[in-house]
Amino acid sequence: SQHPDTFGNIFGGNAYVTTPLIKNLLSLNLRGGYRYGDQNSFFKPESLRDQIYAGNNRNPISPHTNPFVGWSATGFTNWNAGGRINYTPGSHNSIYLDSEVYFARTGSLNTSGNSLTVIRDFYKINNVLNHEADYDWGKLTTYLQYSHTMWAPHAGWTQPAAGESTTGNNATGTVMIPIGASKGAYADWSQMRLNQDIVFQTNYNKNFDFSSFGNLILNLGVYNLWERLNTRNNGYDKALNQTAIFGEGEYIINDYVSTTLGVRVNFSDFYGVVANPRFYVNVNPTQWLTFKAGVASGMLAPNLTYLYDGFTESTSNGVTTLTYGNPNLKVEQSWNYEFSTILDFKPAMLIATGYYTDFNNQIETVNDASIAAGCTLETCRTFRNLSKSLMAGAEVALKVKPIYGISLDANYGFTYTEVLSAVAGSEYLIGGPVNSIPRHSFTITPRYAYKKFDMYVRWQGKFQTPTPTPTGTSAGNTDSVRGVVGKYYKDYQLVDVALNYRFNQDRMTATFAINNLFDVDFYDPIIYTGSRGQAVANNYQRILPSRSFWLSLRADF
């Protein structure tokens, strides 16, 4: 990293090996990886670093200070190990069993109001059994997946209570993790949160040739998800079951016209029965021109984490966020209408798409400092339903095929969102944007390749990203994100560069990359006074890493 004191450095490696056990019958592959990263130390502005926090039952020192802002992440460690056994008893059948274990240790340097450092251990065990049968009567693919996810917070070193002469996990004194630490004394599995998923799906596919009357590609299937969430500290234990049957047929009438008609019928303990039909038509008047139009119904059912009446911690790009579930969430439903034009010439391809989506009960993620004690605009968020809303926009993509080794990928997107109606008491949301989706975004990626060398430069930008409409009963909350930052987050542009060179008969590839080439600083703090005193917000929607340098070596044997 260009600024290791703020973003830290990241190191890691991974390996993959595959080998036959019995020729043409049984094979095995193994994989694994390890990654370590230093803490992300985003400090409060100087005027707030001496802010005093009163002690509580988890703080052995009162008063004390914590110099980090609330979204600074601790150092992290993660690793994964897995393997797959492939069994091919004949030309018509293949079976594999895939298993993997993943571990991550992440945390936050400052939980804001309580001014604590918190760390958690996260484990995920994933197993997939898959069977594929390919016969003249059709292709049948079936899989069964079981995921077991669990995490627990770290506990600190116990400080003895008055009069105690010993310390230990059973002492009666207060417990804390040292501010700035990347691990505690141990993981407290009495506070474990457990999530289990069992997924089953079978899919049938067959191509029917009607000769001069065209072709029909038929796809039928059944899907089932069982999900359970259990939290030991409060006794929460709930399971949901979702089942779907689906069918789709693509009828290729001739070289010029094809249509697709499908439906998915969903059943759930949570939302009952919902049917989602869709229809598309493709017209190809020439070899280089295609028109596509369609209408599709969709739905998004909140998972148990969304419905859980409590906090879930997550860390991404060095930023730690606490998400508070909403047990009153409803299922999001939508109708999407789109039209596309594709121009495909030998030197280039241009795709232009326009779309309009009508939502009922759209699920929106909002930052909310009033969820619980210790929350700030940057550290806490929750979910809410919007009675009616829309999303409309256009996308343009250009792909220039290689000319003397030079090629280009470019795209631009325009997105407009608006809340059309809201439940009683939330009328202030009407007319505001939905979520924080940039109004304008682009990515331009020129590439160059010559023999064993290739490189690219990726230039991207996001503009007019709306801040969320405040929670509460008034749109004038001065300590909301919009009240502090304004109507839009700060615009940004970012440039990345990567160079690759292959050698040793193309068995080895060396890569050198620079992310955030111009070292854009995404930490632009604003001091504001909220309900709990002075706090800090960021002018940017999220903190992206500073300039960083990446060197990797890949070997294939």
Image: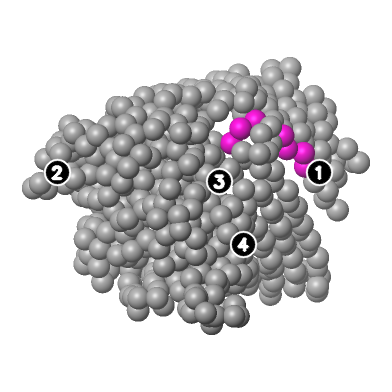
Q: Name the residue that disc number 3 marks.
A: 318
Image location (x, y in percent) of residue 345 = 55, 20
Q: Earlier in the sequence, mark 3 or mark 4?
A: 4
Q: Secondary structure at mark 2?
A: loop
How is the structure coloured here? one colour
Q: Give the extent of the magenta segment.
A: 545-553
Q: 544 above or below 459? A: below
Q: Secondary structure at mark 1?
A: strand
Which three-letter amino acid code belongs to the residue tagged 3? Answer: Gly
Q: Name the residue that disc number 4 marks.
A: 183
Whether residue 300 is visible to the viewer of this picture, yes or no, is: no
Image location (x, y in percent) of residue 80 = 66, 62
Q: Earlier in the sequence, mark 3 or mark 2?
A: 3
Which three-letter amino acid code belongs to the residue tagged 2? Answer: Thr
Q: Name the residue that disc number 1 marks.
A: 553
Rounded to the nearest whole Å, what is the CA distance between mark 1 and mark 4?
A: 30 Å
- Depth check, mark 4 against mark 2: the one in front is 4
Which three-letter amino acid code belongs to the residue tagged 1? Answer: Leu
